[in-house]
């Protein structure tokens, strides 16, 4: 079975140096973006990075393992042998911090893997740094979105998902150990001063979220598409699932809230057309009948419910800053195939691409008239 191996990545590859002055500079600039360096700092750090990258070209597997905790985990998993290039190759994702040093270390590791006929990609998680708690929590929410959007597709096509948590920052490792119970088939580690691989299989965890999500479904749907949600609307939702914004009166989903929502969302979206999130959005009888015809296609019902949630958000957004993501693509129709419809948006755009056709009712209200094939 082909594998997707997700490796947490730190900067120990750079900081494990006997030069105390260099190590101090690396620690000082650990959370810097490229623009934060002064010219002298940048020159010293870049020279050090270039030196390490050049060393990697000539190192044996044993020496590579000594240099990099991340590659130590990967190569120990492979029993110190580069896998054969025949068949479908394994895919490696290197998760790096949103810092200059983090990206550079990730590039060195990915290049080494690719030079050894493995597929590798650096994944930078926005806002991931270790000097700000709120930014870290936002980054973990983004990481959960990435796991859900990327890894589940590979699992559905038969890949085994492995989290390699040997390297990287302890805060990220601990978080991914918990997340791995939902998105990975196993997590692997190598403890410090040990050459043995510890494997932790995924536990058969199933969240019972009916009391939390089922009883607060409208609030979770609004949070999912970015509605402004007041703290007072969330009295029945545990605080650990919420992240309070600066004014302390508005909330978003926390990293754990995002996790349980994404694990449960489709079970609420797959059976029937859900009520609009905005009073400005109206469904015609024809549209409701269209949706009944898709009862045998829960994947399409999920997509339409997501699109209607986005459409509600669009109608509630201010005129000078209209929410209109590419997946929605709401726009006027210059030559409508339906006399009563003057706008359209995506229902889905794969295979038999379908659009939601509708028209404006006045006072900011909008009616979805029908679902039909898109225009060519």
Image: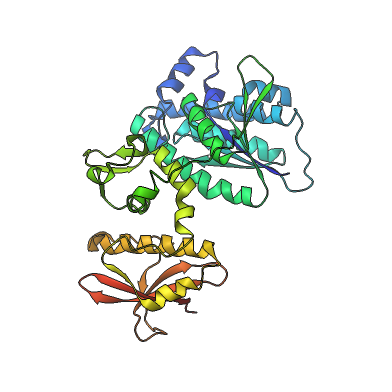
Residue in the image at 49% along x and 46% along y:
263
How many numbered marks have been drawn onto this rendered protein structure?
0
Residue in the image at 39% along x and 62% along y:
274
Asked if residue 80 is positioned above or below residue 293 in the image, the reply reads: above
Seen from the viewer's position, the closer of residues 340 and 83 is 340
| Residue 166 image point, x, y percent | 59, 26
Seen from the viewer's position, the closer of residues 189 and 98 is 189
Asked if residue 297 is positioned above or below residue 372 in the image, the reply reads: above
Residue in the image at 26% along x and 65% along y:
279
Seen from the viewer's position, the closer of residues 308 and 290 is 290
- Please identify the quarter of the rendering in which residue 282 is found: bottom left
Quarter of the image where the N terminus is located: top right
| Residue 333 image point, x, y percent | 37, 78
| Residue 77 image point, x, y percent | 70, 30
- Is residue 201 shown to the viewer in this render? yes
- Is residue 60 shown to the viewer in this render? no
Left or right of 172 in this view: 187: right
Left or right of 64 in this view: 272: left
Asked if residue 226 is positioned above or below residue 165 in the image, the reply reads: below
| Residue 168 image point, x, y percent | 53, 27
- Please identify the quarter of the rendering in which residue 360 is found: bottom left
Q: Which residue is at the far bottom? A: 339
């Amino acid at each position: 079975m082909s594998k997707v191996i997700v490796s947490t990545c730190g900067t120990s590859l750079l900081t494990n140096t006997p030069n105390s002055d260099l190590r101090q500079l690396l620690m000082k600039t650990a959370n810097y973006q490229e623009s934060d360096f002064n010219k002298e700092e940048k020159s010293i750090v870049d020279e050090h990075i270039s030196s390490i990258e050049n060393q990697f070209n000539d190192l044996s597997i044993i020496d590579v393992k000594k240099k990099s905790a991340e590659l130590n985990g990967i190569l120990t998993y492979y029993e110190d042998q580069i896998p054969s290039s025949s068949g479908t190759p394994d895919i490696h994702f290197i998760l790096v911090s949103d810092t200059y040093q983090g990206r550079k270390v990730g590039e060195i590791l990915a290049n080494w893997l690719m030079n050894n006929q493995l597929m590798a990609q650096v994944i930078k998680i926005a806002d991931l740094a270790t000097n700000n708690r709120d930014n870290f929590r936002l980054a973990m929410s983004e990481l959960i979105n990435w796991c859900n959007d990327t890894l589940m597709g590979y699992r559905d096509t038969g890949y085994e998902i492995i989290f390699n948590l040997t390297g990287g920052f302890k805060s990220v490792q601990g978080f991914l150990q918990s997340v791995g119970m939902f998105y990975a088939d196993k997590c692997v580690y190598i403890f410090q001063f040990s050459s043995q691989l510890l494997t932790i299989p995924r536990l058969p965890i199933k969240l019972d979220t009916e009391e939390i999500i089922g009883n607060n479904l409208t609030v979770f749907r609004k949070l999912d598409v970015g509605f402004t949600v007041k703290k007072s609307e969330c009295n029945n939702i545990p605080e650990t699932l919420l992240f309070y914004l600066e004014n302390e009166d508005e909330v978003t989903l926390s990293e754990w809230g995002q996790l349980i929502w994404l694990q449960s969302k489709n079970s609420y979206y797959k059976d029937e057309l859900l009520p609009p999130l905005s009073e400005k959005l109206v469904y015609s009888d024809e549209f409701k009948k269209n949706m009944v015809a898709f009862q045998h296609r829960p994947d399409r019902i999920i997509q339409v419910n997501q699109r209607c949630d986005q459409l509600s958000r669009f109608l509630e957004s201010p005129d000078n800053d209209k929410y209109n993501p590419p997946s929605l693509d709401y726009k006027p129709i210059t030559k409508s195939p339906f006399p009563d419809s003057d706008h359209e948006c995506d229902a889905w755009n794969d295979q038999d691409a379908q659009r939601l056709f509708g028209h404006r009712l006045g006072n900011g209200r909008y009616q979805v008239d029908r679902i039909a094939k898109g225009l060519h």
